[in-house]
Image: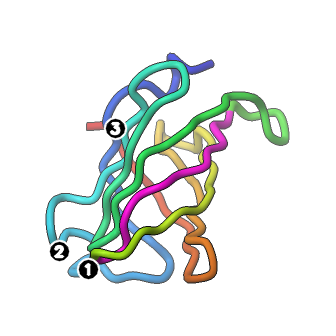
Amino acid sequence: MAKAFKGRWRISEMDVWDNDYLDLVEPANIVFESENDGAFVFGTVKGWLDVRYGARDGSACAEFSWEGLNDTDPASGRGWVILGTAGRLVGHIFIHNSDDSGFVAERE
């Protein structure tokens, strides 16, 4: 299942943050690199992923925990993605003791 997610995906929209914030530092994206590794960035949030692959409601999914930075402060959290329609990822990122947001990403 990891092969279906592998690569770089452009985060095109989030429920909580507008597009100006998403690309504040660099283009917002999520990357699945190998069997268990990956990373994401949006706004001033950057995280490194510990990924596990499986299925959710009959669809391939990737669930992850992450550690990184929110502005310059240490941050961590969790999240998930599924393969949605039109080849897009649909998911949710949670920042521990802070915000969370749904998102959509398209393969680059």
Coordinates of residue 73 in the picture (x, y in percent): 36, 75
48 over 72 or under it: above or below = above
Q: CA distance from mark 2 to mark 3?
A: 20 Å
* Crowd rating for badge 2 (residues with CA inside 10 Å; few <14, some 14–19, many 20+): few
Q: Which residues are magenta?
A: 61-71
Mark 1, secondary structure of its residue: helix
Q: CA distance from mark 1 to mark 2?
A: 5 Å
**Residue lying at 42% horizontally and 69% vertically, measured from the top left:** 74
Q: What is the number of the mark on residue 24?
A: 2
Q: Nearer the viewer, residue 101 or 34?
A: 34
* Crowd rating for badge 3 (residues with CA inside 10 Å; few <14, some 14–19, many 20+): some
Coordinates of residue 106 in the picture (x, y in percent): 37, 45
Q: What is the number of the mark on residue 21?
A: 1
Cβ atoms under marks 1 and 2 closer than 8 Å: yes
Mark closer to the observer (2, 3): 2
Q: Which residue is mark 3?
A: 107
